[in-house]
Image (spheres, grey):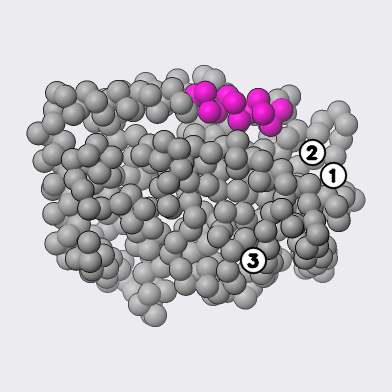
């Protein structure tokens, strides 16, 4: 899919809600950091050197033989997009917010289904990412590993026999891997067990982030669980550790949902129906309120209390109702209040079509 189509389309493969345990595990992401040997890290590059890195990556991804098993990849310059369109890539989780800084020196590589993305000249020369629906960390790693091997046919990565892959930030040295799973945990919150669960995570070498990664809030009861350590562990060890912890959290969330269904069903039904009614009929909705209502409605869908709505729609709406996509749809800038009105109208229209 050309980049222009990507920013005009709110859908990505990770939104399909068809992966393993997709009722709780929204998506799985593997990201690895790589740098070119003998080339200064991105924060030390001038425009010319940054363009040389982009050119080297372009040559690598155009090697059809190398990428025959991975699929067709297309490199695009961020400077080709408007500020709104660049923000849409962030909102779709295809690039990081940091890639927007000094965007003239940066680029992104995408596969047409957006499962694979490669950020160029972010904190490191390359950030290779795979984003899949449900709990599929191992599958995501297998695909990233194929991309990594394909790139190494052309590119020489900075590597130390003692330390592993060398990165701009010491916390990424070693495997250079960040593995994460996005979880939806409304039931644990409702029975007031979420705080204890999240506190326990930090004691096993993992960290909890919000909807858009480091430094962001956990809107709509979505929490990103990821590793903190990249040095001294293999990729398989990192993945196995996260899967083990995430599986325990999923079991706890399932138990919490069963408790709610058994002991507080009327409360949950009321919560879900109020959320549905507000989404279907409201004329002013902020992004924060929309995400809370989506969370409550999703809980009802996943507990079988409401039918006719697929979680895939709610996943896609989390992007479509972001300020950037609203501006893209409207074709003009809007104040926050105007966006809240436009957002509510868009949601009403989606629900009328169900």
Q: Position of residue 168 (x, y in %)?
A: 74, 44
Q: Secondary structure at mark 1?
A: loop
Q: For marks 2 and 3, give the CA distance.
A: 25 Å
Image quadrant in which the C terminus is located: bottom left
Residue depicted at x 30% and y 23%: 255
Q: Position of residue 45 (x, y in %)?
A: 79, 59
Q: Which residues are magenta?
A: 234-245
Along the horizontal axis of the image, is 209 left or right of 162?
left
Residue depicted at x 55% and y 28%: 242
Is residue 239 on the magenta stretch? yes
Residue depicted at x 23% and y 66%: 353
Magenta segment's dominant SS is helix
Along the horizontal axis of the image, is 80 left or right of 48?
left
Whether residue 119 is visible here, answered yes or no, is: no
Q: Position of residue 206 (x, y in %)?
A: 54, 27
Of residues 320 and 351, the one nearer the viewer is 351
Whether residue 248 is visible here, answered yes or no, is: yes
Q: Which residue is mark 2?
A: 165
Q: Which residue is mark 1?
A: 158
**Residue 189: mark:** none
Along the horizontal axis of the image, is 233 left or right of 99?
right
Is residue 171 on the magenta stretch? no
Residue 352, quarter of picture: bottom left
**Which class describes the residues within 10 Å of circle 1: few (<14), some (14-19), or many (20+)?**
some
Q: For marks 1 and 2, give the CA distance.
A: 6 Å
Q: Which residue is mark 3?
A: 103
Residue 86, quarter of picture: bottom right
Q: Position of residue 154 (x, y in %)?
A: 86, 56
Looking at the image, is mark 1 or mark 2 earlier in the sequence?
1
Q: Are marks 1 and 3 in contact (CB under 8 Å)?
A: no
């Amino acid at each position: 899919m050309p980049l222009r189509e990507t920013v005009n389309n709110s859908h990505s493969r990770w939104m399909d809600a068809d992966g393993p345990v997709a009722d709780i595990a929204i998506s799985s992401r593997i990201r690895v950091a790589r740098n070119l040997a003998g080339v200064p890290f991105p924060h030390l590059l001038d425009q010319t050197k940054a363009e040389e890195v982009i050119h080297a990556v372009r040559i690598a991804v155009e090697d059809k033989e190398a990428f025959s098993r991975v699929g067709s990849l297309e490199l695009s310059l961020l400077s080709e997009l408007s500020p709104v369109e660049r923000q849409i890539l962030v909102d779709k989780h295809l690039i990081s917010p940091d890639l927007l800084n000094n965007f003239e020196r940066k680029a992104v590589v995408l596969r047409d289904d957006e499962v694979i993305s490669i950020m160029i000249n972010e904190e490191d020369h390359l950030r290779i990412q795979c984003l899949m629906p449900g709990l599929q960390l191992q599958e995501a790693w297998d695909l990233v590993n194929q991309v990594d091997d394909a790139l190494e046919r052309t590119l020489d990565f900075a590597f130390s026999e003692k330390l592993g892959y060398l990165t701009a930030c010491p916390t990424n040295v070693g495997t250079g891997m960040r593995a994460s799973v996005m979880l939806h945990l409304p039931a644990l919150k409702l029975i007031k067990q979420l705080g204890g669960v999240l506190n326990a995570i930090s004691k096993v070498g993992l960290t909890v982030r919000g909807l858009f990664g480091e430094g962001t809030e956990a809107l709509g009861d979505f929490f990103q669980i990821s590793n903190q350590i990249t040095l001294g562990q293999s990729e398989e060890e990192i993945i196995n550790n996260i899967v083990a912890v995430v599986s325990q959290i999923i079991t706890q969330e399932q138990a919490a949902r069963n408790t709610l269904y058994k002991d507080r069903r009327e409360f949950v039904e009321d919560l879900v129906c109020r959320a549905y009614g507000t989404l279907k009929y409201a004329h002013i909705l902020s992004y924060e309120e929309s995400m809370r209502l989506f969370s409550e409605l999703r809980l009802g869908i996943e507990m079988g209390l409401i039918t006719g709505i697929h979680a895939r729609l709610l996943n896609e709406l989390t992007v479509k109702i972001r300020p950037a996509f609203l501006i893209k749809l409207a074709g003009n800038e809007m104040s926050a209040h105007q966006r809240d009105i436009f957002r509510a109208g868009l949601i009403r229209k989606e629900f009328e079509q169900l």
